[in-house]
Amino acid sequence: MPRRRRPIRRLFLIVLVLCFSAALAVAAVYLMHLDQTVQQRFAAVKWVLPAQVYAAPMELYPGKDDSGNELVSQLGRLGYSNVSALSGPGTFSGGSDVMAVETRPFTFWDGHQDAQKVLLRFSHDKIASITDLDSGKPVSILRFDPQLIGSIYPGNGGQDRVLVRLDQVPPLLPKTLVLVEDRDFYSNFGISIRGIVRAAVADVMARRLVQGASTLTQQLVKNLFLTDKRTFSRKIREALMAILLERHVSKDQILEAYMNEVYLGQDGQRSIRGFGLASQFYFNKPLTELQPYQIALLVGMVKGPSYYNPRTNPKNAMARRDLILGMMHDAGYLTERQLRAQLAEPLGVDDGGGSGPNRYPAFLGLVRNQIEGQYSEKDLSLEGLRVFTTLNTEVQHQLDRHLVDGLNDIEKAKHLKPGTLEGAGVVTSVNSGEVLGMVGGRRVHFDGFNRALDIRRQIGSTAKPFLYLTALEDPSRFNVATLLPNQPIDVQLPNGTVWKPHNFERYNYGAPVPMYVALAKSMNVPTVSLGLQVGVKAVVKTFHDAGFSDVPDLPSIFLGSIDMSPFQVAQVYSTIAGGGFYTPLQSVTAVMTPDGKLLNHYPIKVRRTLPAGPTFITTWLMENVLRFGTAQWAQSVFPKGTVLAGKTGTTNGLRDSWFSGFGSNLLSVIWVGKDDDGRTDLVGATGALKIWAPLMRDLHVKSLDPSMPTDVVEESIDPSTGLKADAGCSDAVTLPFMKGFAPQQYAPCANASKSILPEWLRTMFQ
């Protein structure tokens, strides 16, 4: 029997050896394949880099309206630190009279700008002087690094990051990261045997995977190549790939990749990836400017970005941060004194949500609309383009604040339920057509329905200036003193129905009124009478020339039966504010590649589409709206002598309240209404104007330039007849006319013993 067993044993050993050899061969082939996969995938790693969107850079110069206190707020939005003495780029010291600032270096579309130390002096809420602290020479203009305001990533959500190099980050960050996450990182070979044993014991005791033993290399492999599924096979694959990766890539390369890939939170649909973006998102600062307590907070979040989120779970975040600060001290990275100072710091998280798209969603929507079609979705969401915009963060801040506060005040004054009203607003530069600010609703940081761009509401009396401008283009028939009928009127429409327009104040009928009074008081019947003489098609053409073409060919457009968005209203009003020059409103100034190559620069495009003289006179008519018309209340808001132009707008059923107006430097449009198009019981003066006037005051709007074009002259006129006044006309007013078309016939008032004008008209210019 023993002799017969030997062949069986020998056969078994042969089979066993063959199986083992086959297994080794399969394992070798698998490892070779896995090794090749790791090399190829790591070499082919292409970070998802959404386009970074920047606000316009803040520029300061001697004489600019800017107090020290205002500048402190502006620097705060840029993430500059208020320190006792300048300690590097992104810091400032001082107060309302004198301030020292060290700007950050930045590569603009027109070249690189180095950091600069300057001293600013203020006087009477203006910048008195700017001096370079290194050279002692005066500085004519100081430009700051622009604020990163968001990213453009796929509409269904995606990753976002700001790439950093290991040699660009504060040395304390990688040291602390290794200390907390993988102390043996520089000595292990991709996996930690001690960690594996510890985790295995815990997993066996729990009879499931409950504890990880991942090194930094394993975490990187999982993030780049694998899923989050917790299985033994995935963990084995992860460990093997980590070992193989370390054969081909240096420790520093692995650490740099990890710092750019690690998940550190969520901003709506956007994933916050890497420490570079996390620094901007949580602290509104570049990574290079972080202090130890801020580094500790970010490193602590690696363990659980949701559980240790400083905005939603500040207690957890604080405890974790302080624990890591203690570890930094124990490792010799912080002295006892430094530890106490860092533990005393608050979390220091930026309240505005960092630089994410929730900060200025309405404006970012405009940016995306205006560059759509010029760049592919891939370019915008993957290639890391740098988009420079026209957004003025101070203007946007004021617009956000005044819309929210204004809606609350209106609801309170009208005894409306809080949250009843909605609103939207646009602020633009008169000279350049740049959009300086935009808000799409009272939830100013909510990336939802953008009312500034997407609502279409009737604009009411906001349309009237374009009718009056059309009439003034025919000076042989119409001028500002032309008397317009003010009696009820019936208008036969093309469909056979009869339209019966009436004044807002139905009793306000009577003698004919001068054109300048009809617009200032927003009188409907005289306006329709003028429109019927001018013709619908001519008014449609004026709107087209001003920048809007979708105007119905109906008489009802005379009173604003035109559906437009606040942005579209801002476009047509900007043409009047620009003296008849049409400038397409724009939000983008330049687009660059990540390495600084200029792809596109967007210059201002200007062309005259409306005649200078009639446009100037129309602006004068709109000045009267604020002097003695429906927006007279605004005079109480602005400094005495401020001359602005604008027009209230109210729609049928008191559904929409508009105000559109401008000075020599700024134009803004405000809309107030309800999302369900319901009745608000607001007119333009009691709704939108209450937001517009304080906003423009706080934006330091400048008075209009009183100089007239060469084809406009002034003449003294008797308002009751529209004829030239003589010495006997006690109610004479001075009005602008197109040159050669001022009244030549004198009014018969030389022997008049008393005025025949009604009191409300006689006292307008007194």
Image (tube, rainbow, N blue to C red):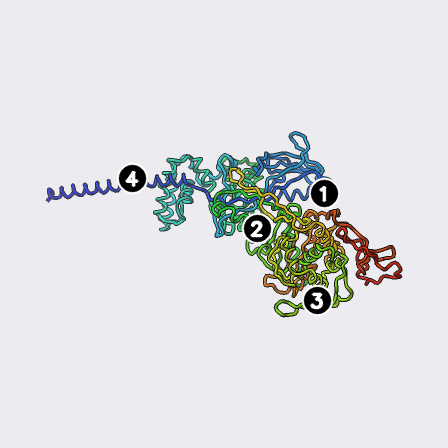
Could you say whether the residue bearing mark 3 is in a helix, strand or loop? Answer: loop
Residue at horizontal 47%, vertical 41%? 260
Using the rendered view, name the quadrant where residue 134 is placed: top right
Q: Are marks 2 and 3 in contact (CB under 8 Å)?
A: no
Q: Is residue 4 left or right of 447 when viewed as pictured?
A: left
Identify the mark nearer the N-term, 1 or 4.
Answer: 4
Could you say whether the residue bearing mark 1 is in a helix, strand or loop? Answer: loop
- The residue under label 4 is 28
Find residue 223 and name its label. Answer: none
Find residue 502 and name its label. Answer: 3
- The residue under label 2 is 366
Instruction: Kindly report the distance in space between the C-alpha atoms of the residues bearing marks 2 and 4.
Output: 56 Å
Identify the mark nearer the N-term, 2 or 3.
Answer: 2
Residue 439 in the image, given as x and y percentages of width and height = 61, 53
**Which label sits in the foreground, 3 or 1?**
3
Categorize mark 4 by other alpha carbons within 10 Å: few (<14), some (14-19), many (20+). Answer: few
